[in-house]
């Protein structure tokens, strides 16, 4: 988890563009309990950029 959860949040479409995935992929990952940390803001699912960065970093695989 990230310590810098301040500033603007991204909706599903913007977050999907940020991590270069389809919005449906983010919805599926959220339903499966995997993927970047998300929050509900009213009825909308939102993501902090710092959490997206942390998730992307966790997806890196060292090249041999």
Image (cartoon, helix red, strand yellow):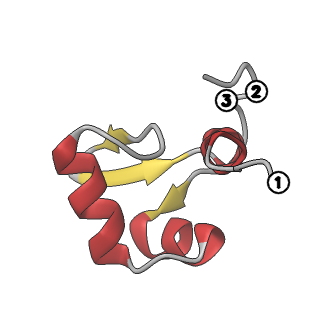
The quadrant where residue 34 appears: top left
**Gap between marks 3 and 1 measured at Cα:** 34 Å
Residue beneath disc 2: 4
Q: How crowded is mark 3: few (under 14 residues within 10 Å), some or many (20 or more)?
A: few
Decide: marks 3, 2 in contact (CB < 8 A)?
Answer: yes
Q: List the single residue furthest toward the front.
A: 64
Q: Which residue is drawn at 27% across and 75% down?
A: 24
Residue beneath disc 1: 64
- For mark 1, give the secondary structure: loop
Number of numbered discs: 3
**Residue 57, above or below 3:** below
Q: Which of marks 1 and 2 is nearer the N terminus?
A: 2
Q: Residue at x 72, y 44 (%)?
A: 57
Q: Which residue is drawn at 62% across and 39% down?
A: 51
Could you tell whether 45 is left or right of 14 in the image? left
Decide: marks 1, 2 in contact (CB < 8 A)?
Answer: no
Q: Residues within 10 Å of mark 1 (few under 14, many from 20)?
A: few
**Gap between marks 3 and 2 measured at Cα:** 4 Å
Q: Where is residue 62 in the image (x, y as percent from the top left)?
A: 78, 48
Q: Where is residue 37 in the image (x, y as percent from the top left)?
A: 45, 37
Q: Position of residue 5 (x, y in %)?
A: 67, 29
- For mark 2, give the secondary structure: loop
Residue beneath disc 3: 5
- For mark 3, give the secondary structure: loop
Could you tell whether 6 is left or right of 40 in the image? right
The quadrant where residue 38 appears: top left
Could you tell whether 43 is left or right of 8 in the image? left
63 or 8, which is in the foreground? Answer: 63
Q: How crowded is mark 2: few (under 14 residues within 10 Å), some or many (20 or more)?
A: few
Label 3 vs label 1, nearer the camera? 1
Q: Where is residue 39 in the image (x, y as percent from the top left)?
A: 38, 38
């Amino acid at each position: 988890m990230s310590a810098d959860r301040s500033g603007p949040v991204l909706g599903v479409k913007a977050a999907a563009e940020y991590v270069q995935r389809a919005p449906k992929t983010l919805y599926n990952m959220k339903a499966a309990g995997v993927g970047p940390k998300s929050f509900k803001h009213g009825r909308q699912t939102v993501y902090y950029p710092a959490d997206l960065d942390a998730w992307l970093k966790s997806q890196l695989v060292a090249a041999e």
